[in-house]
Image: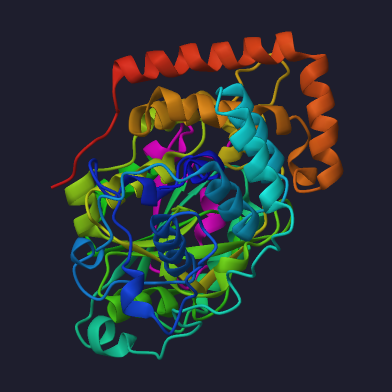
């Protein structure tokens, strides 16, 4: 495994396929679909590079997930030159100096570090997602399983002071071409309006929750449901009429338990290029996902330790992944994520994992370190802080602009004592969370 990949993608699901070996798809079975890079110092590096290409371009196993993961026990350390080559081929060029300084700070051989850096300067970044292996679209097969067998879907929507956007979402659900579903809304609004729900042509169940909480709301709604298939949505979403059909079609086509829909943000980060094709999902967005009830029986419900914080859905997706449950990233089951600034459960937390609301609030959000330390250990958590904190000190809406990285670094070095204090606070809170342990309820 490339050490740089753990730096760039610290919480990547594919780091955790199992505890002993790295198992990725065998590139030898895809000779016509991938390129073997002969310019690596080691053939092992070339093999892992090819396996990475397969994962990134939408390789999806046929039947049993782990039986198809055939590259294992490549427990060797790639040369620093291979590390720099891998970074330059597939990631933003800014990662090259980041890895360079990481090597210096971790006391790696300075001559080999410099040599690897210089050898990478001529390498051009490859367009990894231009030629996906998996399809962009699926044929519609949903009628056979879900319509003929009358498998009902339960759609769960928590809401908080967003009646205007919720109205638009419920109207979108009225227009779904697959109509065999029911909706549960967990309303945590203040002031609360029961009359709001009178005029919808939906099988609608209303749960009033006076104490706001996203994960508590979803858990309570799941427990109160009986359906085999559960869909989760955010209240600031807009949907096309075939949204549910596309989710169900994915479950049936790939014979999986989770269809992870993509969220197209109305502002903020740019839409990732790999959102355009089907692939094994390396994240889970509970604002747009359909899950078989068996997943909750095996993995249990969402961890309420994440209440009011971030990455509760990422933790659940990772927990499912570790339990050999594959999720498919579904490009056709898309939603527009409006990211409304007022109301919503975001009001309780922050815009992202690294940007707290207050100047003296813990940074990153403590739940991020809770997840990182629980699943990846202290070393990976320090790597995450080392790379991400210095470049996270600008606003969310501008975080992808290059000039903001420079501004953020200036802010970091200017106010480093305060920022370090924020990090220490976050670490202490995450320690308390780890000591308490997961707050996960079970269903039968």
Residue at 68% x, 63% y is 125
Q: How is the image coloured?
A: rainbow
Q: Residue at x 63, y 48 (%)?
A: 162
Q: Residue 81 vs residue 69: left or right?
A: right
Front residue of 436/91: it is: 91
Nearer to us in this view, 138 or 155: 138
Where is residue 280? Give x, y as percent: 39, 65
Q: Up-down: is 135 above or below 200?
A: below
Could you tell me residue 289's position as x and y percent?
A: 42, 61
Q: Quadrant of residue 395?
A: top right
Q: Residue drawn 55% across and 24% down?
A: 106
Give the mark count.
Answer: 0
Instruction: Assess whether residue 201 is covered by the magenta stretch.
Output: yes
Query: Looking at the image, is 375 positioned above or below residue 434?
Result: below
Q: Is residue 219 magenta?
A: no
Instruction: Tell me where residue 187 appears, x and y as whole percent.
Output: 48, 45
* Residue 347 seen in render: no
Q: Quarter of the image holding residue 62?
A: bottom left
Question: 28 or 431, which lies in front?
Answer: 28
Residue depicted at 69% across the width and 16% down the height: 419
Between residues 192 and 399, which one lies in front from this camera angle? 399
The location of residue 286, given as percent across then percent down, is 45, 52
- Check the image and name the residue furthest to the left: 444
Q: Which residues are magenta?
A: 187-216
Question: Is residue 226 toward the left or the right of residue 405 in the image?
Answer: left
Residue 254 visible in the current orientation: yes
Q: Is residue 313 left or right of residue 388?
A: left
């Amino acid at each position: 495994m490339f050490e740089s990949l753990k730096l760039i993608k610290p919480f990547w699901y594919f780091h955790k396929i199992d505890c002993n070996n790295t198992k990725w798809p065998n590139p030898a079975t895809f000779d016509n679909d991938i390129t073997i890079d002969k310019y690596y110092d080691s053939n092992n590096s070339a093999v892992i590079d090819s396996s990475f290409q397969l994962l990134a371009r939408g390789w999806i196993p046929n039947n049993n997930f782990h039986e198809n993961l055939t590259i294992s026990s490549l427990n060797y350390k790639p040369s620093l030159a291979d590390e720099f080559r891998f970074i330059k081929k597939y990631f933003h060029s800014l990662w090259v100096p980041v890895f360079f300084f990481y090597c210096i700070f971790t006391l790696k051989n300075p001559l080999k570090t410099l040599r690897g850096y210089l050898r990478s300067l001529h390498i051009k970044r490859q367009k990894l997602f231009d030629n996906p292996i998996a399809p962009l679209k699926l044929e519609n097969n949903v009628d056979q399983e879900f319509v003929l067998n009358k498998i009902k879907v339960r759609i769960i929507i928590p809401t908080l002071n967003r009646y205007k956007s919720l109205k638009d979402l419920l109207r979108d659900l009225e227009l779904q071409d697959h109509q065999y579903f029911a909706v549960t809304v967990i309303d945590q609004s203040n002031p609360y309006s029961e009359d709001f729900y009178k005029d919808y042509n939906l099988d609608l169940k209303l749960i009033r929750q006076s104490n706001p909480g996203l994960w508590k709301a979803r858990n309570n709604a799941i427990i109160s449901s009986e359906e085999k298939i559960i869909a989760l949505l955010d209240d600031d979403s807009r949907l096309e009429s075939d949204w549910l059909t596309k989710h169900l079609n994915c479950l049936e086509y790939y014979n999986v338990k989770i269809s992870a829909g993509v969220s197209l943000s109305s502002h903020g980060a740019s839409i990732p290029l790999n959102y355009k094709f089907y692939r094994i999902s390396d994240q889970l967005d509970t604002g747009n996902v359909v899950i078989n009830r068996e997943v909750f029986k095996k993995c249990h419900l969402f961890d309420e330790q994440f209440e009011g914080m971030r990455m509760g859905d990422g933790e659940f997706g990772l927990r499912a992944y570790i339990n050999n449950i594959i999720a498919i990233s579904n490009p056709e089951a898309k939603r527009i994520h409006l990211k409304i600034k007022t109301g919503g459960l975001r009001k309780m937390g922050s815009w992202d994992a690294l940007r707290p609301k207050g100047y003296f609030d813990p940074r990153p959000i403590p739940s991020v370190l809770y997840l990182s330390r629980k699943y990846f250990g202290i070393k990976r958590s320090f790597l995450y802080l080392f790379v991400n904190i210095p470049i996270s000190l600008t606003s969310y809406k501008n975080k992808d602009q290059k000039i903001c990285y420079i501004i953020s670094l200036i802010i970091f070095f200017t106010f480093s004592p305060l920022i370090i204090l924020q990090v220490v606070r976050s670490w202490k809170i995450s320690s308390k969370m780890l000591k308490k342990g997961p707050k996960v309820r079970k269903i039968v």
